[in-house]
Image (tube, grey):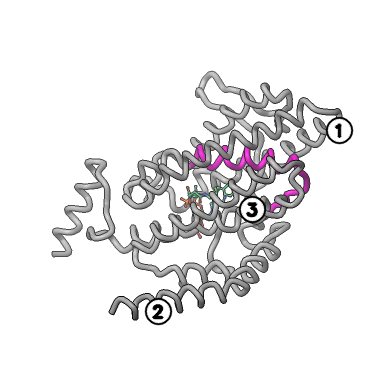
């Protein structure tokens, strides 16, 4: 039976069909998807923090309402992704404990502080932009629940990116001080957003297998280059610059070349010593503890309703 399952799995992957939760799958496929999808869910949840911190300080009622909607969308993305991950067999409590204990990774980018209103613009434009570039190909990931979750998430991310771009556009066309604030935000988030795509291909241990299983459709470096090619045009419309003297299109290889990124910093940030790691985790633990009464009340209510229908 195991052999029939494996043959069917291989055939589904070969013909570009989807693997569904009840299908037989290799344990390593289940494990790597649980890893990637839960890291992705954790990123959405931790990613709420830098932006939620700005809701009270957004410069107008309209900006507050937009930012609140965006932060709420991120919560929704986290919830779909946890549900998707649960279909692989690991319950949400376990995933949540892995995040709160610091055992699980989440995206490096959310360990950098959001220091100004312009940073909200740069996060929307660059961070959501990088997220889209990485996630559009994931809509075709071989695992059904992941690919389907990505479709809706990518639609919402596109709106997020536009709101970030629009914040920067307005600041860039504002006073000299506002334009400087916008440029400073772009300078700060440029390199960290390029690092979101993961280590260079030669140093990416999961890539070969994930590509063979059609979870990944493009390599980390391919997606990073595609992203640079997009923002190099968009930054012109903003009237700002990217902090990269080495950025150029290489006619010979047909690729964008960018400056060397600081992979020592990247490793330190994912190992837990970025500027905001401990603050982000502490905030998550506090929120979880403060929300205990909500979970208890919901469970009590569900039990009461179940008794009523008996
Ligand atoms: N940060 O072998 P690879 C968002 C780890 S967008 C931290 O290349 P893989 C939207 C990697 O896990 C952000 N860790 O790994 C939003 C692995 O460690 P492990 C979330 C990283 O999986 C916007 C090790 O390094 N998006 O949230 C990072 O083949 C605004 C070796 O790397 C996703 O998660 C990193 N940047 O490729 C929300 C997308 N890069 O697990 C709020 C889905 C690598 O072996 C506000 N994930 N690592 O211990 C992916 O596409 C892939 O997992 C990659 C990494 C491309 C991130």
Residue drawn 57% across the image and 53% down it: 107
Residue 220 screen position, x and y as percent: 50, 42
CA separation in Å, label 3 and label 2? 40 Å
Using a 10 Å C-alpha cutoff, classify the residue at mark 2 as few (fewer than 14 neighbours), some (14 to 19) or many (20 or more): few
User: In which quarter of the view is residue 4 placed?
Assistant: bottom left
Residue drawn 55% across the image and 66% down it: 99
In screen coordinates, is 6 left or right of 73? left
Residue drawn 61% across the image and 23% down it: 233
Using a 10 Å C-alpha cutoff, classify the residue at mark 1 as few (fewer than 14 neighbours), some (14 to 19) or many (20 or more): few
Instruction: For ligand 1, tell me if the residue under mark 3 lies within 8 Å.
Output: yes
CA separation in Å, label 3 and label 1? 26 Å
Of the two numbered discs 1 and 2 on the same chain, state the one appearing first in sequence: 1
Task: Determine which residue is flagged by label 2.
Answer: 304
In front: 12, or 258?
12
State whether residue 183 is above or below residue 211. above
Task: Determine which residue is flagged by label 1.
Answer: 177
Which circle marks residue 110 in the picture?
A: 3
- What residue span does the magenta drawing correspond to? 110-134
Residue 193 in the magenta stretch? The answer is no
CA separation in Å, label 1 and label 2? 58 Å
């Amino acid at each position: 039976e195991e052999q029939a399952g494996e043959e069917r799995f291989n055939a589904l992957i070969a013909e570009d069909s989807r693997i569904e939760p009840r299908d037989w799958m290799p344990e390593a496929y289940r494990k790597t998807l649980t890893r990637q999808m839960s890291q992705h869910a954790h990123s959405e949840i931790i990613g709420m923090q830098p932006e939620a911190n700005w809701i009270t300080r957004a410069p107008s009622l309209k900006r507050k309402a937009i930012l609140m909607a965006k932060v709420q969308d991120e919560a929704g993305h986290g919830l779909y992704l946890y549900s998707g991950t649960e279909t692989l067999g690991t319950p949400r409590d376990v995933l949540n404990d892995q995040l709160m204990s610091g055992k699980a990774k989440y995206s490096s980018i959310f360990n950098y502080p959001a220091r100004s209103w312009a940073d909200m613009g740069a996060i929307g434009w660059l961070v959501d932009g990088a997220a889209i570039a990485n996630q559009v190909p994931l809509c075709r990931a071989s695992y059904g629940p992941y690919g389907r979750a990505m479709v809706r998430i990518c639609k919402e991310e596109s709106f997020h990116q536009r709101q970030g771009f629009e914040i920067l556009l307005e600041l860039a066309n504002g006073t000299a001080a506002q334009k400087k604030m916008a440029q400073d935000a772009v300078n700060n988030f440029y390199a960290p957003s390029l690092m979101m795509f993961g280590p260079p291909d030669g140093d990416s241990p999961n890539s070969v297998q994930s590509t063979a299983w059609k979870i990944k459709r493009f390599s980390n470096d391919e997606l990073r280059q595609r992203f640079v090619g997009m923002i190099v045009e968009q930054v012109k419309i903003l009237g700002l610059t990217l902090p990269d003297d080495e950025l150029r299109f290489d006619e010979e290889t047909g690729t964008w070349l960018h400056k060397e990124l600081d992979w020592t910093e990247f490793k330190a940030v994912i190992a837990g010593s970025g500027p905001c790691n401990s603050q982000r985790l502490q905030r998550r633990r506090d929120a979880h503890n403060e929300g205990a009464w909500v979970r208890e009340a919901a469970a009590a209510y569900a039990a009461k309703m179940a008794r009523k229908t008996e």
